[in-house]
Amino acid sequence: MKLDPLSILLNKDLNTTNKIYFISGNETTLIEKIKSKIIEEYKKKYDIPLTKINTIDSFANGGRLFEDTKLFLVENCNGLGEKALDKIRSEKDIFIFAQENSQKIKKIKNLILKDENSYLVECYELDKSSKTKIFNEILNKTKLKIDKNLYWYLIEKLDNKYAFFEDSLNKVMQLDQKDISFSNVRKLLSANNSGKEKIFFNLFKKNKEIIEDYREKIVTFSDVNELYYYCRFYCQLIIDCKNEEEYNKKIPIYLFREKKFLIEFYRKYTSKKKRSLLNLLSSTEKSLRKDNNLSLISGLRFLLSIKKITIS
């Protein structure tokens, strides 16, 4: 059964009798948000503990005190198929799976979709309609009044990636009513989009220059997370492409100014370096999952580690 991620974001009634949630898509910041919202809902309603396991094979149905229900977050979908689903459907426990789209999860998603006791939540970038619904909900709660033209300006300008959309919108909402003007909002959004992603394109500079650039532009946890997702996108592109021709075709058109740098960057990567880069992304992702925020020091260490792998 399919569940709209907006119904979870907007705190609509969630049928917490369902046992299985499969969260997928290609928008990682929204996947993380939906995952945390579902966990929060179950903890609030039933006060049940969260247990993280790597794969469903790690699940052991041993004897339990008072047959307590548990909430399992399964971090990898390996081993999840019809037999495993049949087994966990018969348990009292709740299972949350979260994995980005890939060919290997198509069959799993179809199984979840057909099961009335399971939810498939697909997370993609926000469109105009989604941003409008979220914004309206916040305005209703805060009773804040915004000029009609400014309202549509925000809908247009706010990022389509959920984490960045939420961060920018929260900053706008923190303004006093008297300060919500085109001028102030433009300043706020331009400061919020001050080229954090450009730090990645300066990785061939000296470490001292990179650190200075980082300290100037990265000042909050949100900034670190935003930079991480930019870097992750560029790194994943390198890892996924088998050759330079494929990589060249997949560089987004809007990065035409950075294309020369990106191709030079790609040429430095061997299969061994790609594995090292993948391990770095994996370990950093685990840190993010533990506390939802990278520290300023961790963000800088992550950035310099990418450089070290690249030029080694």
Image: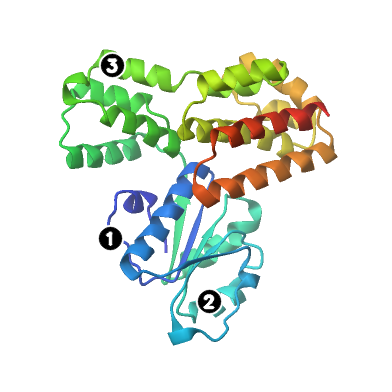
Q: Residue at x 49, y 82 (%)?
A: 90
Secondary structure beneath dot 2 equals: helix
Q: Is residue 101 above or below residue 49?
A: above
Dots 3 and 2: beta carbons under 8 Å? Answer: no
Of marks 3 and 2, which one's residue comes earlier in the chain?
2
Asked whether residue 199 is in view, the answer is yes
- Residue at label 1? 13
Task: Give the mark nearest the N terminus, 2 or 1.
Answer: 1
The circle drawn on residue 242 is: none
- Mark linked to residue 88: 2
Quadrant that contains the C terminus: top right
Image position, residue 301 (x, y; %): 65, 33
- Which kind of residue does numbered mark 3 sit on? Asn
Which is in the foreground here, disc 3 or disc 1? 3
Residue 52 is left or right of residue 118, and the answer is right
Secondary structure of residue under mark 3: helix
Please name the amino acid that badge 2 sits on.
Answer: Ile
Q: CA distance from mark 3 to mark 1?
A: 36 Å
Q: Residue at x 56, y 35 (%)?
A: 229
Q: Is residue 187 above or below residue 24?
A: above
Instruction: Kindly identify which residue carries mark 3.
Output: 184
Front: mark 3 or 2: 3
Residue for point 44% across, 80% down: 68
Residue 27 seen in the current view: no
